Image (cartoon, helix red, strand yellow):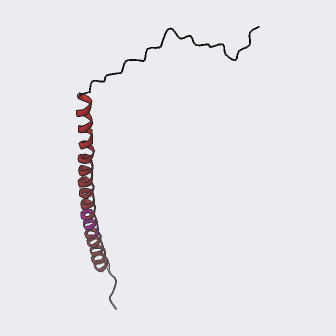
Amino acid sequence: MVPINQNYVVLVVSVVVLLFCYYLFRESKRTQQDVQGLQTFSAKLMQLMEKPQQGIHAVATAPKEVKFADPPVANTDEVIDTTEGKKED
């Protein structure tokens, strides 16, 4: 059996710390790739959102002239009875 002394414990702890550092490095690379993917997605989304807004501004800057039809003219000879159905006291 291997005797447990201070040198052996230091060696085991050093190996564990190196493995932990390797694990953190690998996870940081994965996280960096995820962040770059989100940045790419956000940039594409912003480009898609900007395109329709440019079209709206172009329409808003050049309004069309609206013409209304003349209102119909009522026949002034004709009298309308508005008291129909009302009781007179």
Q: Position of residue 88 (x, y in %)?
A: 74, 9
Left or right of residue 86, residue 29 in this image:
left
Choose top left, top right, bottom left or bottom right for residue 17: bottom left
Observer-nearest of 18 and 86: 86
> Main structural element of the magenta stretch: helix, strand or loop?
helix
In this rendering, the answer to whether 38 lies above or below 11 is above
Assess whether residue 25 is covered by the magenta stretch: yes
Q: Position of residue 66 (x, y in %)?
A: 30, 24
Choose top left, top right, bottom left or bottom right for residue 63: top left
Please provide the residue range marked out in magenta.
Answer: 23-29
Residue in the image at 61% along x and 13% along y: 81
Choose top left, top right, bottom left or bottom right for residue 54: top left
In this rendering, the answer to whether 55 lies above or below 33 is above
> Which quarter of the figure is the N terminus placed in?
bottom left
In this rendering, the answer to whether 49 lies above or below 4 is above
Observer-nearest of 86 and 18: 86
> Which quarter of the figure is the C terminus placed in?
top right
Observer-nearest of 33 and 67: 67
Residue in the image at 37% along x and 18% along y: 70
Point out the residue furthest to the bottom here.
1
Residue in the image at 23% along x and 28% along y: 62
Point out the residue furthest to the front here.
77
Assess whether residue 50 is covered by the magenta stretch: no
Number of marks in picture: 0
Q: Position of residue 76 (x, y in %)?
A: 49, 9
Observer-nearest of 25 and 78: 78
